[in-house]
Amino acid sequence: MLATEFLVRGATEFGEPGVFMMFEENAQELTANVRSLGFDLDQLAAQKKIVVDHVHVERNEIEETGEYDLEGLFIRLGHAIDSIGAKRVVLDTVEALFSGLANHAILRSELRRLFRWLKDRGMTAIITGEKGEASITRYGLEEYVADCVIVLDHRVMGQISTRRLRVVKYRGSAHGTNEYPFFIGERGISVLPITSMGLDHEASTQRIPTGIARLDEMLGGKGVFRGGSVLVAGSPGTGKTSVSAKFVEAACSRGERALLFAYEESAAQIVRNIRSIGINLDRWLKKGLLQIHASRPTLHGLEQNLMMMHDMVRAFHPTVVAVDPISNLTMERDEAEVKPTLMRLIDFLKKEQITAVFTSLTGEEGNTSGLEESQMGISSLMDVWLLLRNTEHNGERNRTIYVLKSRGMSHSNQIREFILSDAGIDLVDVYLGNDRVLTGTARVAQGAEDRAAAEVRQQDHQRKLRQLASKRKAKSDRSAHRRTASGSRSGRRGSDLLQRARNVAGSDRTATYRRRSAIARRCR
């Protein structure tokens, strides 16, 4: 498969024709086998991009006498190369030559000459061989004369198979020495390094809403950063899937593509269940903005699941990816193996500027001492960590949510009640007071009690205001009465004084008249 893809990709993507010379399968068998990968060798052969040549080697049909060489093979291979101007060659596999020819000393010498002949002609060649017990190959020759040696391995651990690839040597190049898991899918072979990618991804300043208005308020009023990673953790039944579905719906509502990986429910089950809280994912599936990939995590190995995610992301180009839940990927797997795999997925999505939402199952309610361990140690890789919990009070269970951390933005440290209803998802303030946090009916009852007490206080306040106003009015009336009475007395005193003045003036005139009359009488 690796050698075939090497030839097909070279011919179709890099303009380098190739020759496939095989010693086991014939051309018809090879063409049929690789058709499942989307490779049409017949069409490429008709376009003179590939030559497929089968060399039949059967031990019973060969009689070895005297000295001989493989010049016939050289001539046959050279003719195939010249016929299409090939740049790439595949020989599959050299073990067939060793099994068909008894004189291994001559065969080894001729293979050395073949390697040199291919190099002199400028051919990039892949020679396949079977793994030996004490050496890389069964006959222990090719790894010494080849410039690059790649070892493929197929292991079964915990009843789950995993293919791995390792570059043993590569002359003139710095190469990775780790084992790289690879996966054979519909589009060929996918290889992903076991080590995490470099931390050189861009950090966007754009904020995107989560789809839950009150949650956006808790995250600084604008949502999360694009390209960030969000961890939604909680015990069973807290609403983790609902939050991830709301993220997905919000992305589709903006005209963006979203991809949901589900490891607990089928796609149809998710669409049906989420519809009960007012989220219609079916319309986005029909519009092509949403894809749901649902499977059991045991269908493939951990690395295969990761590589399938990579392939789907590259093919669909989403802006939001949700994984529900990542904790299912750890079934019977070593945590030391799970964390690097998830780290690679997170780094890959960050590099592609894809907002990632991961849900994870936590332990028992109230057990916060092992919270970090319950997240498989990946919580430190997350930009936003939302924690959902069930609280029990007065015989009922209610959901709560709070932001445990949110990098690069101010966020609320308050607990909110998390309500799922036909109208959708809503966050409401919990009752805080007297060292208590009340939710559900207890919060409603306490709120009604507080409103009744507030109304009583308001009525008492209004009554006191009326009493105060009445006292002020009575005092004002008394002051006005006193002013009126004082004015009446002052008026009477003024009238008496005026009358006295008039009386005095009249008496003075009378006296004057009398004096004048007396003087006049005396003068007569």
Image: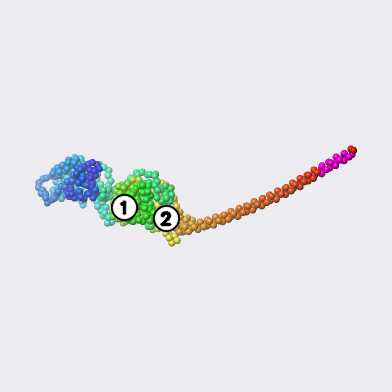
Q: Relative to 507, does residue 369 appear above or below in the rendering?
A: below
Mark 2: few/some/many CA within 10 Å (<14, 14-19, 20+) = some
Q: Which residues are magenta?
A: 507-522
What residue sits 35% from the left and 47% below the top? 256
Q: Which residue is mark 1?
A: 293
Q: Quadrant of the C terminus?
A: top right
Most foreground residue, 491 or 114: 491
Q: Position of residue 415 (x, y in %)?
A: 44, 53
What residue sits 25% from the left and 43% below the top? 13
* Mark 2 or 1, nearer chain start: 1
Q: Which residue is mark 2?
A: 419
Name the amino acid, label 2. Answer: Ile
Most foreground residue, 488 or 316: 488
**Is residue 121 located in the magenta-colored stretch of the structure?**
no
User: In which image quadrant can residue 112 be found?
Assistant: top left
Most foreground residue, 201 or 141: 201
Helix, strand or loop at disc 1?
A: strand
Residue 12 in view, yes or no: yes
Q: Position of residue 71 (x, y in %)?
A: 13, 43
Name the amino acid, label 1. Answer: His
What residue sits 85% from the left and 42% below the top? 514
Helix, strand or loop at disc 2?
A: strand
User: In which image quadrant can residue 522 be found?
Assistant: top right
Q: Residue furthest front?
A: 524
Relative to 330, is 135 on the left or the right? left
Most foreground residue, 285 or 11: 285
Residue 146 in view, yes or no: no
